[in-house]
Image (spheres, rainbow, N blue to C red):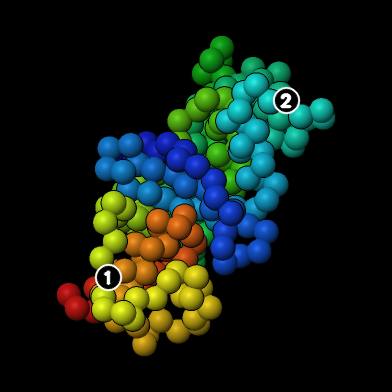
């Protein structure tokens, strides 16, 4: 399968889910962004994993598992985000023992998989299907406006029904949400836009 390599662009606080964060992954070749909603503990663990010079006084769960994996002779080769279903990403962690060539694939939450990947400096991949369904691609330098009735992404987060908003306004809201790093709202808006575009086709 032709996997697409992702890089970590950052982690931001979720504006619509209390205690949650948005992990922003990006496809290197197309700059399509993949926002993944994660918890506070996982956000902290990923951040500490990226900051190699910071060592917590006691090992975190991901540090403990990393040490265990290394002591068994395995190496984390890659992480594959292979599916999104009902807004939830599914991932596999691929391990390999270089001495025996034994391979091991473990199903994992995407947040845990990424937290492990950064500790092994392992690549993160996804599929074209996942990028097409959940990826966001926008030119962020210009944000068009529609008259004086433009809505902010802080307002859209309170809506349960997007049916009363035009397609043009949804695209403007999507632009605003990404600029404000409100990626969970952006993902919700993009799902609605894609649903409407399919009806037009």
Residue 55 bears which disc, if any?
2
Residue 58: x %, y % from top left: 82, 30
The image quarter in which residue 146 lies: bottom left
Residue at the image point whose x is 45% and y is 30% from the top: 123
Question: In what quadrant of the picture does the N terminus appear?
Answer: top left
Question: Residue lying farthest bottom?
Answer: 164
Residue 7: x %, y % from top left: 42, 36
Question: Residue lying farthest front?
Answer: 148
Residue labelled with disc 1: 145
Relative depth, front residue between 118 and 107: 118
Where 162 falls versus 29 (above or below)?
A: below
The image quarter in which residue 171 lies: bottom left
Q: Considering only order in the chain, which callout, 2 or 1, is on the residue closer to the N terminus?
A: 2
Q: In this rendering, does residue 122 appear at all?
A: yes
Q: In this rendering, does residue 196 appear at all?
A: no
Q: Is residue 108 left or right of residue 137?
A: right
Residue at the image point whose x is 75% and y is 35% from the top: 60
Residue at the image point whose x is 31% and y is 43% from the top: 31
Residue 128: x %, y % from top left: 31, 49
Marks 1/2: CA–CA distance: 46 Å
The image quarter in which residue 153 lies: bottom left
Question: In what quadrant of the picture does the C terminus appear?
Answer: bottom left
Dot 1: element: loop
Where 55 falls versus 60 (above or below)?
A: above
Q: Is residue 159 left or right of residue 144?
A: right
Where 98 falls versus 179 (above or below)?
A: above
Q: Residues within 10 Å of mark 1 (few under 14, many from 20)?
A: few
**Viewer-nearest of labels 1 and 2?**
1
């Amino acid at each position: 399968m032709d996997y697409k390599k992702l890089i970590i662009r950052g982690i931001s606080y979720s504006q619509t889910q209390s205690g949650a964060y948005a992990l922003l992954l990006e496809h290197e070749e197309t700059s399509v962004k993949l926002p993944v909603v994660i918890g506070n503990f996982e956000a902290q663990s990923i951040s500490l994993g990226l900051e190699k010079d910071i060592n917590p006084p006691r090992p975190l769960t991901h540090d403990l598992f990393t040490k265990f994996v290394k002591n068994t002779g395995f190496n984390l080769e890659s992480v594959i985000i292979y599916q999104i279903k009902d807004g939830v990403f599914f991932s596999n962690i691929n391990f390999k023992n270089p001495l025996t060539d034994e391979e091991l694939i473990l199903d994992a939450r995407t947040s845990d998989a990424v937290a492990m990947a950064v500790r092994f400096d392992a690549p993160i991949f996804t599929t074209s299907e996942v990028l097409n369904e959940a990826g966001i691609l926008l030119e962020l330098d210009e944000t068009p406006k529609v008259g004086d009735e433009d809505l902010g992404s802080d307002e859209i987060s309170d809506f349960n029904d997007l049916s009363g908003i035009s397609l043009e306004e949804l695209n403007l809201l999507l632009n605003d949400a990404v600029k404000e790093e409100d990626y969970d709202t952006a993902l919700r808006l993009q799902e609605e836009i894609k649903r409407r575009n399919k009806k037009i086709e």
